[in-house]
Image: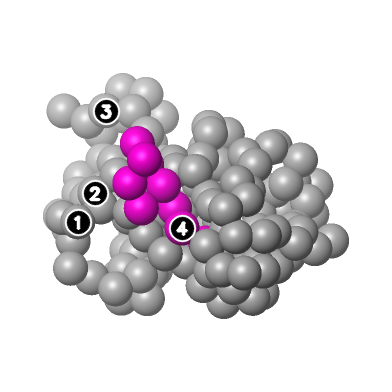
């Protein structure tokens, strides 16, 4: 279903929202009262929350007169995750959110360049204590590495 928001409306971080794709308008992603990114048509929100089960990395605020988002339910997202033969794609897209929100201002990549960069990467999901030899630059999304 669709969500329609007026300028200044906070797009709530509710688990019932699942994934949101912006159909029209713009959304400011706020972190500690500062706008760290502006999203627009075809950008998505909530991938990190869906993959990691954790809360969103920033607060989404409608910044155009009217913003319309397509809300994809968590149930549909779980079916997509389960049916996707390459489920690492979802984690790669979640990495885009993690990088943009946690490293705002540190990267000069556009969102689209960062998406392309993350989609080219590899995803490792080792079990605790298992050694994995990594030769490429690595972004650790959860846990820690020695």
Is 42 in front, or is 65?
A: 65
Residue 50, quarter of the rendered image: top right
Magenta stretch prevailing secondary structure:
strand
Q: Is residue 99 magenta?
A: no
Q: How crowded is mark 3: few (under 14 residues within 10 Å), some or many (20 or more)?
A: few
Q: In which quarter of the image is residue 66?
A: bottom right
Of circles 3 and 4, which is in front? 4
Residue 61 placement (x, y as % from top left): 54, 52
Crowding at label 1, few (<14), some or many (≥20) Cα neighbours within 10 Å? Answer: few
How far, Cα to Cα, is label 1 from label 4? 15 Å
Q: Mark 2 points at which residue?
A: 103
Q: What stretch is highlighted in magenta?
A: 27-35
Q: What element carries label 4?
A: strand
Q: In which quarter of the image is the N terminus?
A: bottom right
Which residue is the site of mark 4? 28
Which element carries disc 2, helix, strand or loop?
A: loop
Q: How crowded is mark 2: few (under 14 residues within 10 Å), some or many (20 or more)?
A: few
Q: Residue at x 65, y 42 (%)?
A: 12
Mark nearer the N terminus (1 vs 4): 4
Please tell me whether mark 1 sits on a helix, a strand or a loop.
loop
Q: Are marks 2 and 1 in contact (CB under 8 Å)?
A: yes
- Mark 2 or 4 closer to N-term? 4
- Specify whether 128 is left or right of 7: left
Q: Which mark is residue 144?
A: 3
Q: Mark 1 points at which residue?
A: 105
**Callout in the foreground (1, 4):** 4
Q: Position of residue 18 (x, y in %)?
A: 70, 48
* Mark 4 residue crowding within 10 angstroms, few (<14) / some (14–19) / many (20+): many
Image height of 109 relative to 100, above or below: below
């Amino acid at each position: 279903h669709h969500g329609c928001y007026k300028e200044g409306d906070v797009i709530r971080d509710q688990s019932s929202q699942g994934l949101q794709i912006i159909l029209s308008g713009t959304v400011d992603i706020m972190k500690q009262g500062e706008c760290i990114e502006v999203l627009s048509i075809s950008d998505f929100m909530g991938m990190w929350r869906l993959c990691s089960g954790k809360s969103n990395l920033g607060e989404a605020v409608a910044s155009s007169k009217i913003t319309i988002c397509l809300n994809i339910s968590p149930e549909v997202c779980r079916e997509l995750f389960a049916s996707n033969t390459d489920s690492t794609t979802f984690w790669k897209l979640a990495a885009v959110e993690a990088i943009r929100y946690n490293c705002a201002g540190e990267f000069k990549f556009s969102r689209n360049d960062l998406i392309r960069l993350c989609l080219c990467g590899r995803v490792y999901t080792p079990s605790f204590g298992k050694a994995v030899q990594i030769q490429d630059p690595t972004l650790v999304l959860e846990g820690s590495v020695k």
